[in-house]
Image: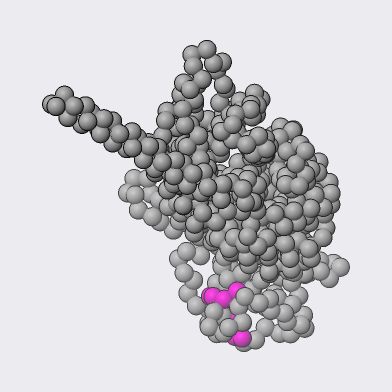
Amino acid sequence: MRVSLILVKVYALALFSLYALFAADDAQLALSLKAQTEFDRVELPASPTLGEAAACVQSQAGLLPVAAPEELARLHYRKGYCTLVGAVITQNMDAYAAAAAEFDKAIASWPLRLAKGGKKSPPEPVSSGLKVLAAISRLQAGTGESELAEIAAAVQSATCSSNVMQTDVCRELLDTGKLWLGWMALRAGNLDEAGAGFAGSSATGWPAWVAGQRAFVGRSYRDAAAHFSEAISIWKSRWQAPGGPAFLQGLGPRPDMASAFVDLGGAELLSGNIKAALDTLDAAIKAAPGEARPLFLRGRAHEFAGQMDQGLADYNLASRTAFANAQEQASGEAHLYRGIVLYRRHDFARAENEFSSALNFDIPAGMQPDAVAWRQLAAVAGGACGAAREYLERSLAAVSPYFPVEEARSLAAECVTVQDKMASRSVNKVILLGHLGKDAETKFTPSGISVSKFTLATNRRTKDQQSGEWKDVTDWHNIALWRTENVANFLLKGKQIYLEGRLESRSYEDKEGQKKYFTEVVCEAQSLVLLGGGGGRGDSPSESSGDYDRPVSMPRSAQRPPSAPPAAPAEEFNQGITDDDVPF
C-alpha cells in the first residue's frame, strides 16, 4: 500500500512537471511570436513609426533572458535595428550608441548560432550588413574611431547569406556603406575616391555634387553651379519631402543644405550670375543664420555688383558673426573679414594688422592662403613696394577664387613702375611747417618774376643724454620762394606757413675772397599755405582771424598796409644768420 502511494505521488509529480514544461514552452512561444510580429512591423514598412520601434525594442528585450544561446545573435540584431529606427527618427545620439551596442552583442553572439547544428557544422561568416549597421551607428553617435575601416572591410568581403537578415536588406546596407565611404572621401577632399564610392547611386544626388566639385576645382564655375543645383534639387525631394526618406535611405550620409547653398552661391558668383548668387546666399543665411561664410560671400556679390556700401555691411556682419562663434574671441576668420572692411576703406595699416592677427589665431585651412595674400596686398597698397610686392606675387598661386587676384596684380604692377622710376631717378623733396624768422625780402628778375627770400624756423624735441630732460631745439632753413606776387606782403616775421620744395646748394665767395657753400629750400608760391600765428602786420591773417589753413592772395599792385611797430621776436627765432650770409 505504501509503495503504491509513493508511485502515485511520483506519477503526479511527473505529470505536473510535464505540464509546467509545456506551459513554459507556450509562454516562450508567445514571447517569440510577439517579438517577431513587432519586428516585422518595423522592418517591413519603408518608414516605421517611433511607437512601433519602441514596442519592438521592448518585445526583443523581454525575450532575450529566456532565449536559447543560438537565438541571441538574431534577437540582439532585432533589438539594435529597432533602436536604430528610433534614433534616426529622434536624432538622439544616445540611441545611436545603444543601437551600436546591440549590434556588437549580435556579432559577439554569432558563434553560438552553430551550437544547434553540431560541432561538424561549417562556420558561418558574420553578415556584412550587420557590420555596416554597427559602424554606421557608431559613426552617427560619434563614439568610434575606426568606422571607415570597418565599413570598407564589410564592403570588400560582402556576405549576405545569413538568415538573420534579409538578403535585400543586407545588400541595401552595403550600398549605404559605399555612400559613407564616398562621403568620407569627399570630406577629405579626395574627389576620385568620392566618385568611386558614389558610383551607381545617381538617385542620391552625391554623384552630381562630386561633378560640381570637380568643375569648381577646374574653374568651370557655370558647370559647377549646374551640377550643384542638380544635387540640391535631388536632396530636397529626398530629405525634405513630407515624412522624410525611407528608413534604410535615411541611414546614408545626410547633406548639409546650408553649406550646399553656400557652395552653389559661390559658384554662381564666380560665373557672373550675381542675381542668382544673392538669392542663393540669402537662402544659405536663412538656413544657417549663425554662419559667417555666407555673409562674406554675399558681401563679395554686392561688391561685384558695385554696391560697395552693402558689401562693407556684409563684411562687417560676417566679422561680428565669426567673433560671436569664436572661443574666447580668438577667431582668425573674424580678423580676416574685419581686415577686408578696413582695406576697402583704405585704412591699409590697420588692415594689415588685422590680417596678421588672422594668421596668429585659428583660421580654417582654406582661408589661410587668402589671409596671407590680403596681408601682403595691404602692405603694398600702403606703400611697401619692396619685399611685400614679391611676397604678394608668390602668394597669389595659392589663393581661393574669391580673392581679388586681378586687383592685386594691377597694384603690384604699379609698384614695379614706381620702383623703376625711382631706380632711374633721384628724389629731392622737402616739406616744412614753421615760422618766419624775419620779413621776406622780395626782388624781381629782369624778366619780372618775383622771388622772396627768408629764413624759416622749425622745432623738434630731443632728450639730453646727461640730464635726461627733454629740450626744444630750433632748426633754421633758408627759403627761396618764386612767383610770390600775390603773397609777398603776408610773409612777415613770426608768420606760420607750410611749404613744399627742393634743396639746392651753391657756392660763392665772401668779402674776404673765401669760398662759402650755401644751401636753401627752393619752392614755388603755389606750394605755399599761409597758416596762423605770429605775423602781426596790419591785416595779415593770424590764428584768431580764422583765415589760416587757406592760401591768401593779394594783387601785385597792392601796397603793404601800415604796420604797427614790430613785436619783439621770440628767443627761439634768433637764428644768428646775418644778411652777409645771404648772397643778394
The image shows residue 288 at horizontal and vertical percentages of: 59, 60
Up-down relation of residue 157 to residue 290 (above or below): above
Q: State the count of labels.
A: 0
Residue at 49% in and 29% down: 107
The scheme the figure's colours follow is one colour
Residue at 47% in and 74% down: 568
Does residue 537 show up magenta in the picture?
Answer: yes
- Residue 518 in view, yes or no: no
Which quarter of the picture shows residue 555? bottom right
The image shows residue 73 at horizontal and vertical percentages of: 48, 31
In terms of depth relative to the viewer, which is nearer, 408 or 267?
267
In terms of depth relative to the viewer, which is nearer, 391 or 221?
221
The image shows residue 386 at horizontal and vertical percentages of: 69, 41
Which quarter of the picture shows residue 471? bottom left
Assign the magenta stretch its main secondary structure: loop
The image shows residue 131 at horizontal and vertical percentages of: 56, 31
What residue span does the magenta drawing correspond to? Answer: 531-541
Residue at 46% in and 52% down: 55
Up-down relation of residue 134 to residue 499 (above or below): above
Residue found farthest to the left: 2
User: Does 556 sit left or right of 552 as displayed?
Assistant: right
Does residue 552 show up magenta in the picture?
Answer: no
